[in-house]
Image: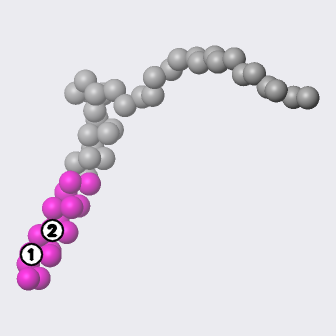
């Protein structure tokens, strides 16, 4: 049982390292994680009496 838990911990650490590496190196593989830049304007009607 202890070997299984140790294996799962190693697997989770390896997945985390892979995910962090993909985030940093993703632009070389064609992935773009930047937010879209666009301006949004909507009229606001205030009913103040």
- The boundaries of the magenta stretch are 1-16
Is-magenta flag for residue 5? yes
Which residue is labeled 1 in the image? 4
* Quadrant the C terminus occupies: top right
Q: Is residue 1 above or below residue 16?
A: below
Q: Quadrant of residue 13?
A: bottom left
At x 8%, y 83%, the residue is: 1
Q: Nearer the viewer, residue 5 or 48?
A: 48
Q: Is residue 26 above or below residue 12?
A: above
Tell which residue pokes out farthest to the right in this image.
49
Q: Is residue 16 above or below residue 31?
A: below
At x 69%, y 17%, the residue is: 43
Residues at circles 1 and 2 in contact by the CB criterion of under 8 Å: yes
Q: Is residue 32 left or right of residue 49?
A: left
Question: Label 2: how many residues lie within 10 Å, few (<14), some (14-19) or many (20+)?
Answer: few
Q: Position of residue 42 (x, y in %)?
A: 64, 18
Q: Is residue 2 left or right of residue 25?
A: left
Picture disc at residue 40: none
Which residue is labeled 2 in the image? 8
- Distance from disc 1 to disc 2, alpha carbons, whole Å, reads 6 Å
Prevailing SS of the magenta stretch: helix
Q: Nearer the viewer, residue 1 or 10?
A: 1
Callout 1: SS: helix
Is-magenta flag for residue 4? yes
Number of disc labels? 2
Q: Is residue 18 left or right of residue 4?
A: right
């Amino acid at each position: 049982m202890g070997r299984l838990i140790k294996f799962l911990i190693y697997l989770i650490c390896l997945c985390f390292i892979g995910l962090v590496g993909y985030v940093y190196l993703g632009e070389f593989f064609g992935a773009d994680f930047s937010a879209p830049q666009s301006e949004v304007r909507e009229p606001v009607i205030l009913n103040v009496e």
